[in-house]
Image (tube, rainbow, N blue to C red):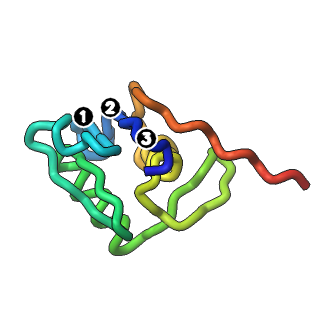
């Protein structure tokens, strides 16, 4: 993962589906979410609650981009911590807590 050996754990509530969600990354992800479903993409695996896992798999299959901030840009959807957190925040919405947040990428000047 992009944040080394740290584990990112995000909890939130998806108003569109009417359910809470949890997503976990990092080397201990599989141990941190009982009943979670693994999603893998380009050699990286995250663990998510079933509804969020289905939403993420659908996005990877059909709309594989994420918005990095409220005003863009859209980038390829990957499962690195910074991109998946941006996707949860700006595309899914409802992020409530983040444990082990990655350091934001520097913004290009100009």
Q: How crowded is mark 3: few (under 14 residues within 10 Å), some or many (20 or more)?
A: some
Check whether the beta carbons of the residues at disc 3 and disc 2 lie within 8 A of each other. no
- Please state the horizontal and vertical placement of residue 74, each as a whole percent of the image: 60, 62
Find residue 99 and name its label.
Answer: none
Element assignment for label 3: loop
Residue of label 1? 20
Residue of label 3? 93
Find residue 11 and name its label.
Answer: 2
Element assignment for label 1: strand
Q: Can you tell which quarter of the image residue 20 is in?
A: top left
- Please state the horizontal and vertical placement of residue 4, each as a whole percent of the image: 46, 43
In screen coordinates, is 49 left or right of 42?
left
Q: Residues within 10 Å of mark 1 (few under 14, many from 20)?
A: some
Q: What is the C-alpha distance between the residues marked 1 and 2?
A: 7 Å
Check whether the beta carbons of the residues at disc 1 and disc 2 lie within 8 A of each other. yes
| Label whose residue precedes the other's in the sequence (1 or 2) | 2
């Amino acid at each position: 993962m992009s944040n080394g050996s740290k584990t990112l754990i995000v909890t939130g509530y998806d108003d569109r589906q009417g359910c809470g969600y949890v997503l976990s990354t990092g080397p201990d992800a599989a141990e941190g979410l009982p009943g979670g479903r693994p999603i893998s993409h380009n050699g990286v695996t995250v663990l998510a609650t079933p509804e969020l896992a289905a939403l993420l798999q659908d996005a990877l299959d059909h709309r594989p981009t994420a918005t990095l901030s409220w005003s863009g840009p859209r980038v390829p959807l990957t499962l690195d911590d910074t991109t998946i957190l941006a996707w949860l925040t700006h595309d899914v919405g409802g992020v409530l807590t983040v444990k082990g947040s990655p350091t934001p990428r520097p913004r290009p000047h100009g």
